[in-house]
Image (tube, rainbow, N blue to C red):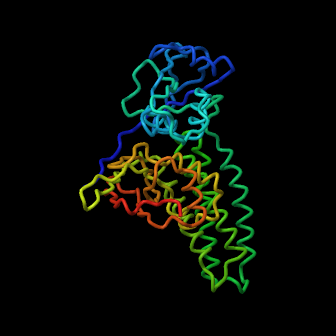
Amino acid sequence: MHASTSTCALVLLCALALDSRAQAAPATHTGKMATASREFRGMEVVGQDGKRTPIAPSKNFKLDHEASRSGESLLDVTRRKGYAVDPGTVEAVRKWNPKVESTINPLRAGETLTFVRPVENVEPDAKLAVVPGARPLTPLVFTTQRAEIAKVRMEVQKTYGQPQLSAQQHQRLQVATDKIERANAVFEARATTMSPRQQALAAVQIEAATAQIRTAAVSASVDRPDAVLASAAIAADAETFAKLLSSGPRKLRVVVRSAPSGKAAEPLAVYVLPLGLVRYGPSTDETKLRNLIGVLTFSQPTSPSLGDVEPGVKYAVWVGPRHSVDLMAKLVKNGSVKKYVPVDATPASLADVIFDEADQIRAP
């Protein structure tokens, strides 16, 4: 069975300017809905094609109070309410709920959380994203990487003719550098129209590939080709992702089979990362891994679970306990995530990924 392709989702970028009164306001509301005050500015609808359309002013937004369900964290409720889970949005939702200390720990069942919803109808599959301070996605991170790539290119050039690398290995590093330079140029040019998920994927892949090439130029050898192979793999994935940036996300369905006894498997989270980061994760900063896992983790637990993946990216997909983003980042950093399924998200229709409950990755 194949999952159907996703329909184009709109991303609503809302600006939030919170003062002390705005943060305290939710506690004073007793009804299900209440009119939001003046803390919302600069709101617009952003389509998958990057087109931005201004929407109505703050009078068309309301505060929405939602009770958590058993076992849900603030992050779970945020996803269930239809919000994107990029770091900016999650931080804004946390500020709306100042009494919640952790975004990933389970809440008390029935605990009331505050969200903001537009009154007018935004398509059923739309996601709401909130960028504090109306900060648009900027090309700054990719501009910085452009300078780093130029430095890495010089380091690679210095290895030419050196005995630690073969001519073929040197050529592979040059090709990898060319690929991330081309990919980074695409990301830099289109940063303001990329979705938060696309920007997070692009930034981490470029940084990881640059770091791998630098490591290979310094420490790889004819007898230890792993760093060169890692550089080539991550750079190739980054360039393919850049080429397919305009394509809409694909839908991937993940199923955890029941035990032989017939007992239903426990609900598990579906964790997703670019394949190169899982295979060569130790070169990536743990905080960046944690943020990216938080953005990419499927919004609903198994089974089944249906989530979005970006075409052009080769993913590692695995299942594990819910509310375990921090743990998974540590395991990836330590190279301990082994029971994953590789998925190339390029085809328009993706086959189901099927696990047994015993395949879940837990703390060692």
At x 63% / y 22%, what residue is drawn? 23
In the image, is residue 207 above or below residue 132?
below
Counting every numbered tag in the picture gives 0
At x 45% / y 32%, what residue is drawn? 109
Q: Position of residue 203 (x, y in %)?
A: 61, 51
Residue 341 in which image quadrant = bottom left
In the image, is residue 273 above or below residue 170?
above
Which residue is at the front of the view, 7 or 191? 7
At x 56% / y 70%, what residue is drawn? 232
Q: Position of residue 174 (x, y in %)?
A: 63, 71
Residue 20 in which image quadrant = top right
Q: Position of residue 83 (x, y in %)?
A: 48, 34
Residue 193 placement, left or right of 357: right
In the image, is residue 28 above or below residue 188?
above
Q: Position of residue 240 (x, y in %)?
A: 49, 59
Which quadrant does the N terminus fall into? bottom left
